[in-house]
Image (spheres, helix red, strand yellow):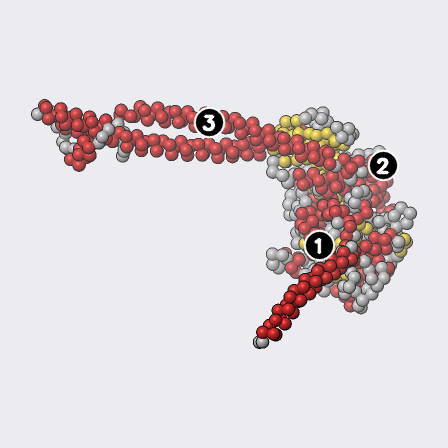
Amino acid sequence: MMRIARFYQKTLFGIFALMGLIVGLTSALYVHTVDRQLTDDFLKNSRTIARSIANSNIDLIVHQNYSALQSIIDQFVQISGISYVFVVDEKGVIIAHTFVPGVPDEIATDYKDAKDVYDRTLAGLGNFSEVTAGIVAGEAGHVHVGMDKGYIALQVQTAIGKEVYLLTMIFVASVLVCYVLMYQVSQPLDHLRGYAWHSLSSEKHASSPDPSQVKRLLERTDEVGELGRVIRWASGRGS
Amino acid sequence: MSPSSLARRGRRRGTCKLASARDVCFTLALLLITALLVEPALPEEASAGATGQSEIRLGMSADFSASARALSIELYRGAMAYLRPINNAGGVNGRRIAITAYDDQYEPDLAIRNTLKLMDEENVFALFSYVGTPTMNRTLPLLRMHQAKDFLLLFPFTGADTNRIPPYDQLSFNLRASYDQETRGLVDHFIAVNRTRIAAFYQADAYGRAGWAGLREALAKHGLEIAGEATYRRGSPFDQSYDRQVAIMQRLQPDAVICVGTYPACAGFIRDMRDRGVDCPVATISFVGGGAMLKLLSTAGQESNKDYTSRLVSSQVVPSYDDDSVPTVREYREAMDRYRDAIMPPDSLLYPEGKRKEREYAPLPYGFISLEGYLNAKLFVAILQRMGVDPRRADLARTVLNMGDFDLGMGQPLSFGGPSGRRQASDQVYYTVVRDGRFVPFRDGEWEAWAK
């Protein structure tokens, strides 16, 4: 076990605390940003899909080619996160949809308000954000696209999970590196302490310091070596 | 070699260099002129389809290996039953007629890929007897993009409106009546016996929507609306539970249910409906694959000792395959008897993952679908005969539109063209019910038995 001098333990703890704080704050900021951004992106995508269906298939609706219209909306449900699409004509009749085994009651009773976004909870299916787009500015009907909130949440959680995992890994690696570096810094001090005890104290330690270690200590050109040489001088005067 | 000969050779080489440069220029000029002259003819050549070929190839994309395979296999068998003797006798004007078939598993994306292959690589004369609405719907825009090459879709096995109304109505010809006509007939008959609360059970895709739209329009003519609806996913098997759909019907309590689906799902739905005591009349339309559905219901009925086929009416777009009074039906039955196994699609198409006993397809002796395939092939041969010795794809549409009234021996008038430019030959819808384990005609007066 690598022991670090008590002298440095508080510093080490301070560094760890600071790093933890940085990781924590970064994660929190990231969670907030990603959550908002991904959710916005998903809603934006579904709105784009709704608009694209609404703007590009006016002829099919006018000619009442519902089969071709259904072919088109079926393709969009294959996109991850898009759970359902339905098209309402100008009379408020659902003329194409992707529901099985049928249009949920929650939708059948509430889809004619032409709201921009509906927040829905469908029994047995989950929670959905439903965006709408008007066909010919709403004159010919509306396209509704339902995004699974569970899917959005899962995507957000996955993105956040990956980031937090990375930050945690960086934190753990930094802690280990820090610890090793501090150990390397504190080791000569520990040797110096042992040398001082051995040289100056009347209560001699059971084990005397390794002469090669003492030699290396006294040869150092830094403050530790200087202190070692002072201790040697002081012990020489004392004796 | 003497120096003089070397000098001569050097001079000659110089001359040759000049001559070869002249030759190259001349050749290039010739090539350019040829290219300029030939290039305008290339699209025409490419669109010819049959010129210089010993056979006429028809391209077919259909589900040969997945949930609706019985429909495609029987349609193919019926067509081959007609073409086989024609080919044995030397073909039409010396050209045999071959069907190049690809499996699309009833998946639109595969149908698109197959169609591209059939047009670009196989350079087929025409696309023929495609099976299914969702697949056809996605193929039509492709045909529109390749309109300059004159590819046409002949006699698809679907009654959807997509190829009958703009913008895709000029890209195909139909033999059969539409789903709108089938559902209209069913609705009219149900309403005539006071069954006005009509619900729909349909496939959640373009096919189901086509039937739904026909039903809605038919009811609207009587001032009515669809009483309610239940849907299922394309490819749903017979073994699956249809309880959720039946629960909807139990809640609706309809006077009749019209099913717009394929045989496994419709059979499963009818079984579960009857098991839960919903006993109103049920109708299916022609695409269901009556023979395959009957087989499933009969087997299930034997196992549970119930009759799942009562109060079941199926609309058809061809006469009954049992009706010997119709000349074409007689021919068809003879051909089916003669070629039974010899007209099966190749195993590589039916069993892409290898032939296994439990997946082996047992062909039906006769059926509405193989009869339709037979009639499709017969009609194509009639068209080809009118195109003369050098049939060209570019002339196909004109030839069909010039046919006017014609007779395929179906016991009903057929026509293409005319003042309205008809692209659907038949408007006739037939109704059948199950008696003694087989579909038999359901005459107009017999609907009274279902009066409410």
User: Residue at the location (80% across, 50% down)?
Assistant: B172
Give the chain of mark 1. B
Image coordinates of residue B105 in percent, x first then y, are 67, 51
Q: Residues within 10 Å of mark 3 (few under 14, many from 20)?
A: some
**In the rendered image, which residue does mark 2 sit on?**
B221
Residue B6's spot in the image, x, y percent?
60, 72
Question: Residue under circle 1?
Answer: B120
Which residue type carries mark 3?
Answer: Thr
User: Which residue is depicted at the point 73% across and 47% down?
Assistant: B142
Residue A41 location in percent, x, y? 60, 31
Q: Which of marks 1 and 2 is nearer the N terminus?
A: 1
Q: Is residue B367 above or below residue A156?
A: below
Q: Which of B446 and B403 is in front in this view?
A: B403
- In this view, which residue lies farthest toward the bottom? B1
Question: Which residue occupies the foreground of this view, B185 or B309?
Answer: B185
Question: Quick one: SS at disc 1?
Answer: helix
Q: Three-letter amino acid code at disc 1? A: Asp
Q: What residue type is labelled 2?
A: Lys
